[in-house]
Amino acid sequence: MGRGAAASKTALLLAEDGERVRMISRTGGGPDHPLIDKVAADATDTDRLTELTEGADTLFTTAAPPYHLWPEQFPVLSASLLSTARRTGVAYVMLGNLYAYGPVSGPITPDFPLTATGPKGKTRARVWEEAAASGVNVTEVRAAQFYGAGAVSVFSLMVQRQVMEGRLVLVPQELDVPHSYSAIGDTARTLVAASRNEQAYGRAWHVPTSTLSVRELAGRLADLAGAPKPRMEEMTERDLTMLAFTEPFWAEMHEVLTKPGHPFVIDYSETEKILGVSVTPVNDVLGEVI
């Protein structure tokens, strides 16, 4: 389920290994490959989704409702996916994120309690907890902030192009506090590896990440792109509030900002040890972006 960067990369990895893949999204989009069948469908139509999933070994989901509608729409989407997995008997691999942990101090391991109090974090926690208690053979792969070719994140939307064009960067996070970033390619490789390892099911895993400040990441991008040294400023609460008038997405950022002065870092050692997925060097990921 899904057609974004993580879904497309996952589908390509599977197809390149000789697996037949059916990509399901509202638009029917996705990468072109002879082993990838692209289908337009609504994932909340459980009967239709069940029909499309029959005969498959694994159901992957990278899909999500519009950011500002998560509390209302995510439980509906999740219930349909769970029902489909239950009806068809497929293994179920979910792509999640770190919101359910809340603003805690790291390094965060996958067994950290899910203590988020904000609506998006509580929604993510509920989606996983219901899946884990459902009796379905399920696992969740949790990614940090995305970066890389095709990523949609604060870094891609507010830093990437501005740095390469030599413009002032305004970003709603502390500039010099370490933060974990997940490459799109590493996210896809972790999803595939989890789907193929029986030890993966019944628990969550962290995507291998690179940890550095947004200023350091922007500086690396500038150096590789031959752009000027980045000019960066942290956005104020007022800046973010004003931006929210232009698009509901930005109003949601207040909830997921990390605690001031606290690095937000995850531990992915189990993913390396058990699933065999390692982190891609930062410069290699940024090279794909350029």
Image (cartoon, rainbow, N blue to C red):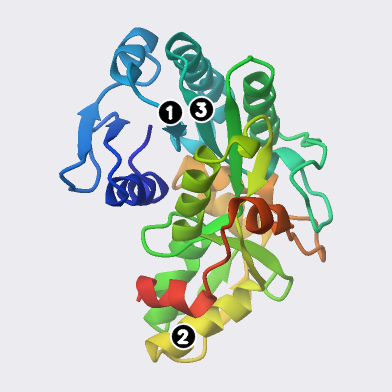
Frontmost residue, 269 versus 131:
269
Left or right of 142? Residue 89 is left
Q: Estimate the x, y position of residue 45 in percent, counting from the top left.
A: 36, 12
Question: Which mark lies nearer to you, 2 or 3?
Answer: 3
Based on the displayed image, in which of its 4 quarters is residue 258 positioned?
A: bottom right
Badge 2 element: helix
| Neighbour tally class for label 3: few under 14, some 14-19, many 20 plus, Cα within 10 Å | many
Left or right of 65? Residue 271 is right
Question: Which of the two labelled residues, at mark 1 and mark 3, occupies the earlier sequence position?
Answer: 1
Left or right of 267? Residue 169 is left
Q: Estimate the x, y position of residue 125 in percent, counting from the top left.
A: 69, 30
Q: What quarter of the picture does the C terminus occupy?
A: bottom left
Q: Which mark is residue 59?
A: 1
Frontmost residue, 154 versus 236:
154
Question: Which of the two labelled residues, at mark 2 and mark 3, occupies the earlier sequence position?
Answer: 3
Q: Estimate the x, y position of residue 29 in percent, counting from the top left.
A: 23, 39
44 above or below 272?
A: above
Q: Are marks 1 and 3 in contact (CB under 8 Å)?
A: yes
Give the residue at the far left of this rendering: 34
CA gap between label 2 and label 3 equals 39 Å
Residue in the image at 39% along x and 78% along y: 287
What residue is disc 3 on?
92
Residue in the image at 47% along x and 34% along y: 64
Task: Name the amino acid, label 3.
Answer: Tyr
| Neighbour tally class for label 2: few under 14, some 14-19, many 20 plus, Cα within 10 Å | many
Badge 3 element: strand
